[in-house]
Image (cartoon, rainbow, N blue to C red):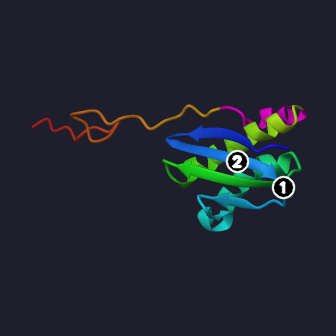
Amino acid sequence: MATIHKIGRRKTAVARIYLSEGTGKITVNKKEFETYFPTPTLQYKVRQPLAMTENVENFDVKINVYGGGSTGQAEAVRMALARAMCEIDAENRIILKPEGLLTRDPRMVERKKFGQKKARKKFQFSKR
């Protein structure tokens, strides 16, 4: 099997993954996966597509991720992995699609408007 290259996005984070046959080693930005995503929640999110398709120990994953915060990056990696699982076997799509792992989440941060404190919050109004 040749290396599979897929891209996942979430908020402003972009994840590029390179999937090859191996023993289940996950490397993120040349660091160990557990050190890059220290919380169990983020680790679960990253492993979710592999666990659902029962491929945790079948593939080595090399991940380059940039932009956004830790949650956005973890979810971008999750999407890229889900896309790769579908390319390996079309049957995996049936498992991953109902969980929403193949859907690009369009929610982005709303921009700050001038004359306001934040995107929607206003400065305090004073009548007198």
Horizontally, residue 110 falls left or right of residue 24, namely left
For disc 2, the marked residue is 18
Front residue (pair 112, 78): 78
Q: What is the count of numbered marks?
A: 2
- Based on the picture, tell me whether residue 68 belongs to the magenta stretch: no
Q: Looking at the rendering, which quadrant does residue 102 occupy?
A: top right
Q: Looking at the rendering, which quadrant does residue 14 occupy?
A: top right
Residue in view at x 32 percent, y 39 percent = 121
Front residue (pair 119, 82): 82
Task: For mark 1, give the secondary structure.
Answer: loop
| Residues drawn in magenta | 91-103
**First-in-chain label (2 vs 1):** 2
Residue in view at x 21 percent, y 34 percent = 115
Residue in view at x 86 percent, y 58 percent = 57
In terms of secondary structure, what is the magenta stretch mainly? helix
Task: For mark 2, give the secondary structure.
Answer: strand
Disc 2 marks a residue whose amino acid type is: Tyr
For disc 1, the marked residue is 56
Residue in view at x 85 percent, y 44 percent = 1
